[in-house]
């Protein structure tokens, strides 16, 4: 929500000798893009403030996490958000179930620079492929060359734990296709349960991980708890550092 939160959490990363990146996610919806508030005012900043949230830091990776009720305008929305993101914006996480390839290709055509794209695989995306790892990997093939990374995320910020067996099967099938896409997982992660990731990190040492709902203060405040977020990052780094064959 602000640059001070970025600097505080990035300090946890920069204090370590092993190389990790902190992915800074700023939430935007089609509603807030139009200047309206939504039901999570503690999570969605005013869009005119986005460029001031992202900072220049060698350990940060700056992404706008975008969701929309009007997927037919995705290309123009992303183009607008590219301007709003400022000079330190690195790309987007699309919290959209299987966004239009036509819209994504149009955006890439209109923007004269490489933009990193993370595709969230949430509940809707999983349901669309019958929660089948094979069908999901088949569907993902269409996005190779457009999407750089995927995030298996059945929680969607609701602090609900992911299913370890299902997630492992999704990741194994995607990795077996050798698409060259980065892999990530999310779902209810907090400092006190991050050890659940240990089996995944052993098998996928370059895994990206994501947390949101478990790092926040209770409703109605619903703000990032910097102490909990810092604990989470420190324990995550320790978990990766001690995993066999971990490459950070």
Image (spheres, rainbow, N blue to C red):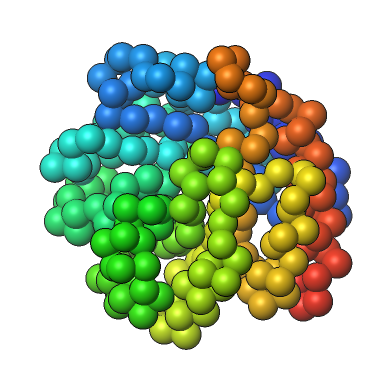
Q: Is residue 97 visible?
A: yes
Q: Quadrant of residue 13?
A: top right
Residue visible at 48% across and 53% down in the picture: 153
Query: Quadrant location of the N terminus?
Result: top right
Query: Quadrant location of the C terminus?
Result: bottom right
Q: Is residue 43 above or below residue 166?
A: above
Residue visible at 40% across and 53% down in the picture: 122
Q: Is residue 114 visible?
A: no
Q: Quadrant of residue 11?
A: top right
Residue visible at 81% across and 50% down in the picture: 235
Q: Is residue 66 above or below residue 144?
A: above
Q: Is residue 141 left or right of residue 205?
A: left
Q: Quadrant of residue 37?
A: top left
Nearer to the camera, 97 or 149: 97
Q: Position of residue 16 (x, y in %)?
A: 85, 50
Nearer to the camera, 115 or 112: 115
Nearer to the camera, 59 or 248: 248
Q: Position of residue 68 (x, y in %)?
A: 27, 36
Residue visible at 66% across and 23% down in the picture: 217
Q: Is residue 6 above or below residue 171?
A: above
Q: Position of residue 208 (x, y in %)?
A: 60, 59
Q: How many marks?
A: 0
């Amino acid at each position: 929500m602000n640059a001070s939160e970025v600097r505080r959490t990035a300090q946890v990363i920069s204090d370590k000798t092993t190389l990790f990146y902190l992915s800074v996610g700023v939430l935007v919806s089609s509603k807030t893009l139009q200047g309206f508030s939504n039901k999570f005012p503690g999570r969605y900043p005013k869009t005119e403030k986005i460029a001031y949230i992202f900072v220049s830091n060698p350990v940060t990776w700056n992404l706008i996490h975008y969701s929309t009720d009007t997927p037919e305008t995705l290309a123009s929305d992303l183009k607008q958000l590219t301007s709003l993101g400022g000079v330190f914006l690195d790309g987007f996480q699309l919290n959209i179930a299987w966004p239009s390839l036509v819209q994504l290709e149009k955006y890439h055509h209109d923007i004269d620079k490489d933009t990193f794209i993370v595709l969230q695989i949430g509940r809707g995306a999983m349901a669309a492929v019958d929660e089948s790892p094979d069908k999901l990997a088949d569907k993902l093939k269409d996005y190779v060359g457009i999407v750089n990374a995927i995030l298996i995320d059945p929680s969607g910020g609701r602090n609900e734990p992911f299913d370890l067996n299902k997630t492992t099967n999704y990741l194994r099938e995607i990795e077996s296709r050798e698409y060259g896409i980065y892999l990530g997982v999310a779902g209810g992660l907090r400092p006190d349960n991050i050890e659940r990731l240990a089996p995944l990190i052993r098998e996928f040492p370059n895994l990206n991980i994501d947390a949101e709902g478990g790092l926040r203060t209770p409703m109605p405040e619903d703000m990032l708890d910097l102490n909990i977020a810092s604990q989470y990052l420190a324990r995550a780094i320790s978990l990766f550092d001690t995993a066999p064959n971990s490459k950070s």
